[in-house]
Amino acid sequence: MLTTEILLTKPTLFDNYIIVSPSLWWNDEKLLKVQPCSFDSNTSIYIAVGKEGEVMERTAKELYNKLKLNKKEHVKLFYEFLENKTHGDALHNAVYNALDAIFKVEKK
């Protein structure tokens, strides 16, 4: 949740954001009501959620869709639904996949 809040309110603090299974339902989903700041630099955002129940899955997808609407050309945005993972085991796979997606080196 902290990563999501920083992304939405102070996006220039980091170039890359990895958000896995965010508890966006907390506090009446207030983070989903925040209008994201614009991204002035190259930014990568990776959002993932496992099979964690309707609310967790819905709110993670809503965050992705909200960012996608305001996405600029220099922003890389990824979303992954880890259908065979739960809240307890999604993190490891998601972080590996995020690092691979964000820092992918094209083979020559």
Image (spheres, rainbow, N blue to C red):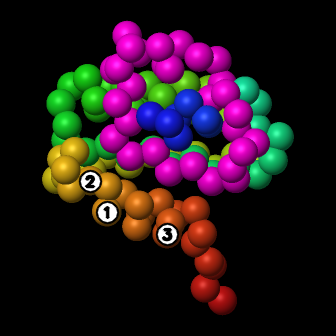
Task: Answer whether residue 95 is magenta in the image.
Answer: no
> Label 2 neighbourhood size at 10 Å, few (<14), some (14-19), many (20+)?
many
Q: Secondary structure at mark 2?
A: helix
Image x and y of residue 53, in percent: 18, 30
Circle number at residue 90: 2
Three-letter code, disc 3 = Asp
Q: Secondary structure at mark 1?
A: helix
Mark before the other along the chain sequence, 1 or 3:
1
Q: Nearer the viewer, residue 86 or 10?
A: 10
Three-letter code, disc 1 = Asn
Span colored in magenta: 8-36
Q: Which residue is mark 1?
A: 93
Image x and y of residue 13, in percent: 72, 45
Task: Answer whether residue 29 is magenta in the image.
Answer: yes
Is residue 67 depicted above or below 92 in this figure? above
Q: Which residue is mark 3?
A: 100
Residues under labels 3 and 2: Cα distance?
15 Å
Q: Secondary structure at mark 3?
A: helix
> Label 1 neighbourhood size at 10 Å, few (<14), some (14-19), many (20+)?
few
